[in-house]
Amino acid sequence: MTAIEMNAFRTTLETLQSELLGNGSRGRESLTVEASADDLDRLQSASERDYAISGIVRNSSRLREVRAALGRVIAREYGVCVGCGDDLKPKRLAAVPWASSCVACQEYEDLRQTAPFESLPFAA
């Protein structure tokens, strides 16, 4: 990967990091609890809080991934699969700039996390 490409991805990741940090404070405002005598209002408020919490968790997870990618940029390891060591395809990095694995390794990891190890087709 050229220095120009690396700087472009670094800028993209830094922008994403700034956006995610900004979204965190807006999502927390939805967590306020308002007293209401109406059961329907309480139910709707609880639903909105659950939605806000899931958004905060999702943003927090993405922020960790973006920061890890920025760490790989600094270490000059960005664009290399952490699983197999192959270079990540530019299309993958353009679509998912925080990606740390190639598609094959990511699919394997996703399968490993969702299915019992014995049921994987390539388990020993």
Image (cartoon, rainbow, N blue to C red):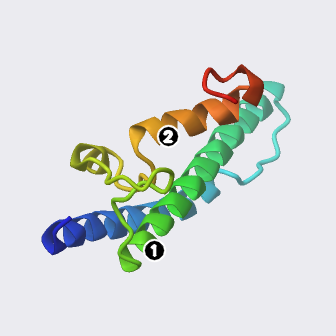
Which structural element holds mark 2?
helix
Binning the other alpha carbons within 10 Å of mark 1 as few (below 14), some (14 to 19) or many (20 upward) gives: some
- Estimate the x, y position of residue 95 in percent, counting from the top left: 30, 44
**Which quarter shows the N terminus?**
bottom left
Q: Look at the picture and state if 54 lies above or below 3.
A: above
Amino acid type, label 2: Gln
Residue at left 36%, top 52%?
A: 86
What residue does disc 2 label? 106
Q: Look at the picture and state if 63 lies above or below 10.
A: above
Q: Name the foreground residue: 44 vs 25.
A: 25
Rendering quarter of residue 38: top right
Amino acid type, label 1: Gly
Residue at left 35%, top 75%?
A: 76
Binning the other alpha carbons within 10 Å of mark 2 as few (below 14), some (14 to 19) or many (20 upward) gives: some
Q: Earlier in the sequence, mark 2 or mark 1?
A: 1
What residue does disc 1 label? 71
Q: Name the foreground residue: 68 vs 79.
A: 79
Which structural element holds mark 1?
helix
**Which quarter shows the C terminus?**
top right
Q: Is residue 56 left or right of residue 4?
A: right
Q: Look at the picture and state if 123 lies above or below 31.
A: above
Rendering quarter of residue 91: top left
Q: Is residue 86 left or right of residue 58?
A: left
Residue at left 72%, top 54%?
A: 32
